[in-house]
Amino acid sequence: MSDPKSTPVDEADGAPALSARQASPQARKAALASWLGSTLEYYDFFIYGTAAALIFNRLFFPEGDPVVNTVAAMATFGAGYLARPIGGLVMGHIGDRIGRRTALMITLVIMGVASTMIGLLPTYDTIGVWATVLLLLCRLAQGFSAGAEAAGAATMTLEHAPQRRRAEFSSSVMMGYASGMVLSNLVFIPIALLPDEQFESWGWRVPFLVSVVVLVVAYWVRTKLEETPVFEQEVETAAVRGDHGADPASRTELAPAKVTTELPALVVLRTQWRDVVRIVFITLFSVIQTIVTVYGLQYATGVHGIDRTSMLVINVITVGLSMVSIPLAARMADRIGRKVTLFIGAVGCVLSIWGFFWAIGEQNLVLIFVFAFINQSIFYSCWNGVWPAFFPEMFAAPVRYTGMAMGNQVGLILTGFAPTIAALLVQPGTLGWIPVALFVTVAVVISCVAISTARETHLVPTAELGPLRARRAFHEHPELIDDGPPAPR
C-alpha cells in the first residue's frame, strides 16, 4: 500500500488521485477525528442544556419565582449561542490563514476546560451572584468553542472526502452531535435517579467532570490528523498565507507574486455576503433540536410533571437512533441532492413537532416517544446529514471556514434562545404549547424559503465550489485562476 502522504494529488480538486467515491486513509481519519471532537463538543454543550432544564434554576439563581428562574436558566443556555459567532469568526480566521487542524485543536481544549470548570463551580448559596457570573462566563467559553468546532470539523472533513461522498463523510460531524447527546443523557440518567439532596449537592457535577476523558481521547486522535490537501494546495500557490508560506520550488505557473492581506471575513462579506445571509436563514431549521431536546424536557417535567428519567431515556433512544439515520440521509443527499433532502426533513419535522407537544400535554409517554422518534430519529436527520456539507460547499477554499462559521453561527443565535422564547410563549393548560409549535413552524418555513434560493452543489467538483470571484479574491493576478472544467450534470 502506498504512503498516503506521497499519494499523487488530483489537480482538479486538490484531493488524492482516487476515484470520485474512493476514500483515502486520511479521509477516514478526518471523519473519525470530526466525530470524536464533535462528540466532546456536543456532550459538553448539551449536558449544560440538561442541567439548565433540571437543576440550574435552583442552584445558580436567588430564590424567587420559579418561572422567572427557569427563564433565566434557559437564557444562560442561550448565551452560549451568542458567543458562537465570535468563536466562528476568530477561529475561522485561524483556520483559513494558519490551518484547519490548528483551529480545531484550540477549540477542543477550550470546550474541555470550560466544561470541567462548570463541574467545579460553587453555587449561589456559597458565593452569591458571582456563581451566576462564573457560570455565564463558562457557558460563553463553551459557545465560543462550539461556534468554531462545527465549521472547522465540517470544512476539514469535506476537504478530505471523496468528491461524490462529501455529505456522507461530513455527516460524521453530526454523528458526533448524536453520540454526544446520547452520552450526555446516559451520564445524567443514573445521576437523575439520586435522591434530590444528593443530586443537587454533588450529583449534577459528575457529567461535567467526565468530559475530561472524552477530551483526552479526542485530542490524541486529532494530533494524528494531517492538514487537508485543499488547504495545502492553497498554501503552495501562496493563496492563503503569502509567499512566506510556500516553498518557491513548489510554485506553479498560477502562483502570483504576492497575495492580498485582506482578512478572510472581509473577503467573504465583499464576495459572498449573500451566501452568509442565506445560511443565517437556513439555519433557523435547527430550532427544532433545542425545542425538542431542551425545552421539551423542561416542559414535560416542569409543567406536566412527567418523570425526568423517562424523558431522558426518550432523548437517549431517539437521538441515539439518529446515528443510523444521519449517514443514510447524507448518502441520499449525495445521490438526489442537498435541497430535496432538506425539504423532506422540513415537512416531517413540522408535522411531528405538533404531535410531540400534543403528546406531552396528554402526558402519554408512548406517544411522546413515537413523535420524538419520527422527529429526531428520522426527519431531523435529513438536516443533520446535509448541512455539514451544504454550507461549506457554498464557499471558496480560501474563505470556506470563515464564511460557513459566520452564517451558521449567527443563525444559531435564535436556536440557542429558542427554549427561552418557548418558555415565554407557552400558555397554561393542556393546549398551551400551540404558540411554541407555531413558532417552530414559522422558523422552518423561513428556512425552506432560503434553501430554495441556494445553488445545488452535490455534483459540483470540490475545486469549483464557491463563486469564481471569491476564489480569485486572494490573488494579485486573478486572471490566472480559471473556473476549471464544466461541472458534471
Image (cartoon, rainbow, N blue to C red):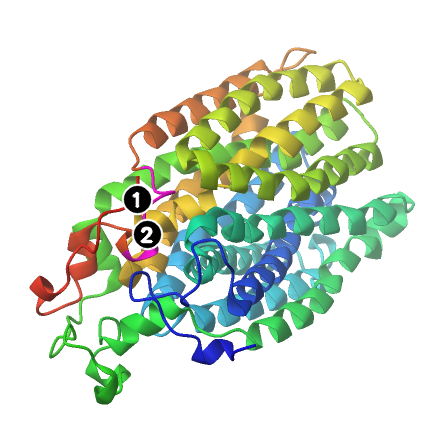
| Image point (65%, 36%), residue name | 293
| Residue matched to label 2 | 461
Residue 189 in the figure: left or right of residue 403:
right
Residue 280 or 154: which is nearer the viewer? Answer: 154
| Residue matched to label 1 | 488
Tell which tag, 1 or 2, sits nearer the viewer: 1
Residue 274 or 194: which is nearer the viewer? Answer: 274
Question: Is any atom of residue 56 visible in this view?
Answer: no
- Residue 337 picture quarter: top left
Amino acid at circle 2: Pro
Q: Determine which of the numbered discs, if any, sits on residue 53 in the image.
A: none
Q: Residues within 10 Å of mark 2 (few under 14, many from 20)?
A: some
Residue 481: x and y in percent read: 15, 63
| Image point (38%, 46%), residue name | 391
Which quarter of the image is occupied by the N terminus? bottom right
Element type where label 1 sits in the image: loop
Q: Is residue 457 above or below residue 36?
A: above
Element type where label 2 sits in the image: loop
Residue 100: x and y in percent read: 42, 68
Contact, mark 1 vs mark 2 (Cβ under 8 Å): yes
Q: Tell me where the magenta segment starts and ends, as one range.
A: 456-463
Instruction: Give the overall secondary structure of the magenta segment.
Output: loop
**Does residue 375 show up magenta in the picture?**
no
Q: Earlier in the sequence, mark 1 or mark 2?
A: 2
| Image point (37%, 51%), residue name | 392
| Image point (63%, 38%), residue name | 325
Amino acid at circle 1: Pro
Residue 149 in the figure: left or right of residue 132:
left
Which quarter of the image is occupied by the C terminus? top left
Residue 287: x and y in percent read: 51, 33
